[in-house]
Image (cartoon, helix red, strand yellow):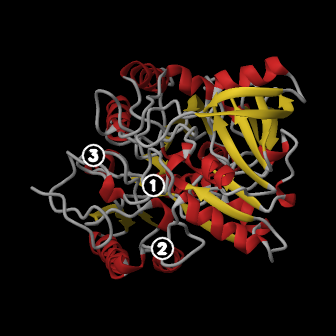
Amino acid sequence: MTRVAIGGFLHETNTFAPTKADYDAFMHGGGRASIADAASVLTTMRGINAGQAGFIAVAEANGWEIVPTIACAASPSAHVTKDAFERITTTMVDRIKAAGPLDGVYLDLHGAMVAEHLDDGEGEILARVREAIGPDVPLVASLDLHANVTPEMIAQADALIAYRKYPHTDMADTGRASAEHLALLLGAQAPLAKAFRQLPFLIPISWQCTNDQPTKGIYEQLAALQSEAVPTLSFAPGFPAADFTHCGPSVFAYGRTQADADAAADAIAAIVMGHEDDFDGRIYTPDDGVRHAMTLAKTASRPIVIADTQDNPGAGGDSDTMGMLRALVRNRASRAAIGMIYDPQSALAAHAAGEGATVTLSLGGKSGISGDAPFEESFIVEKLSDGRFIAPGPFYGGRKMEMGPSAALRIGNVRVVLCSHKAQLADQEMYRFVGIEPTEQAILVNKSSVHFRADFEPIAEQLLICAAPGAMPADPSTLLWTRLRPGIRLKPNGPAFPA
């Protein structure tokens, strides 16, 4: 029987963000499953939108013996602490070593992890696993579309396979593709050739959405180029908030011959380069965005949905900046809701006051973001919740959410979803669990950049992007970069990072 070890360790690191990911962050999961040990990986990872879930389904259908090690993820943030990285990686590698003879290894990784003591988190994980299994056991990993892929990652893995959809509705699909590629490697007489290309400009995450051009068309052409000669081909637009040498977009291909791999990688790289002008779009200030949404709402039959993109907890924000809430209140928006505001202290105060009470809060603004401060006002506590619910939409895919003490607050005609744990607002249920029906609102403000679109586009009249203060600038050239590779442009057609 084919024996395959599996493991998952995911974190998207924004090195400019205010809060690091310690071991407790992985224990909670931040909208993903909390740490699953070897005994519970198979049950925890079945039937959800996750790489390991897709891999397990194919492995079991193939009759493989699965050796689980660990599964964990944390909400995007600043660096993974050394303690968390070493504890989790050591657990994974030790369980692989203890597994006995293996025919293959699959890892579910993000591809943009930076630790306190290591720039290239995934490169180090893959290197340690490779050392444990030796040079001949196939090692395959799935990656996030936002991976900042490094030469070390390419060198250590036999194949890396990235998501092709943003919003990431294909995480399980990518796990399935990884299992199918591993099956190909197990039957191959020789390893496949590799090709790797790093591209010379950073791509803002708001314009990486695969529902829109140019990214949608790029992935359509990528799929057309995949063939028997090139079984696996990936484009990773990258995560443009990790200050280290290999931050940025890349293309990686695996072919029957080196010429096959090189030709496919060069073709996709050329297509992306040809669209440099197109990775751009309209971004509103908070007041302009709210006023425009209010105008649109007068004749709209569905909500106007605004992305509070710079405070996206899915990109390292703390989900607590107050720029968009202030703009809603200042402009007297009605039938408006914003979520989710992460503020455990205010959530406890709302619970202490009780439903129907008026409570004065110093809400949010606690992450120290420049240009932001707590919003000191009185709010009506409309509804309380323990924060437990299922998020059934296409991004979270039925995950059990644990948001801690939560509440719906109201100030004027604006409602606020308040919670005690961070998670990106990417599911309609993240309003409903505190009694707010999103389809009945004129304006919704989601602390998200793109993932919310999977569940909110079907109910939205129009989508807008606003740039209020936050840890993830919509324009990556505004970040204080110090360690990028010389010559890479800080945004499409933007200034080059100096030598």
Front tag of 1 and 3: 1
Identity, as a three-letter code, of the amino acid under mark 1: His
The answer to the question of whether label 2 and label 1 lie on touching residues, with beta carbons closer than 8 A, is no
Residue identified by numbered label 3: 152
The answer to the question of whether label 1 and label 3 lie on touching residues, with beta carbons closer than 8 A, is no
Residue identified by numbered label 2: 281
Q: Earlier in the sequence, mark 3 or mark 2?
A: 3
Seen from this angle, which residue lies furthest left? 499
| Residue plotted at (55% across, 42% down) | 313
The answer for how far apart the CA atoms under marks 1 and 3 are is: 17 Å
In this rendering, would 97 be left or right of 428? left
| Residue plotted at (61% across, 47% down) | 326
Instruction: In this rendered view, identify the residue nearer to me: 319 or 112.
Output: 319
Say which quadrant the C terminus sits in.
bottom left
Q: Find residue 236 and report its horizontal and vertical position in percent.
A: 42, 61
For numbered disc 2, what is the local secondary structure?
Answer: loop
Instruction: In this rendered view, identify the residue nearer to me: 167 or 428.
Output: 428
Residue identified by numbered label 1: 146
Identity, as a three-letter code, of the amino acid under mark 2: Gly
Say which quadrant the N terminus sits in.
top right
Q: Find residue 184 and report its horizontal and vertical position in percent.
A: 50, 58
For numbered disc 1, what is the local secondary structure?
Answer: loop
Identity, as a three-letter code, of the amino acid under mark 3: Glu
| Residue plotted at (27% across, 51% down) | 246
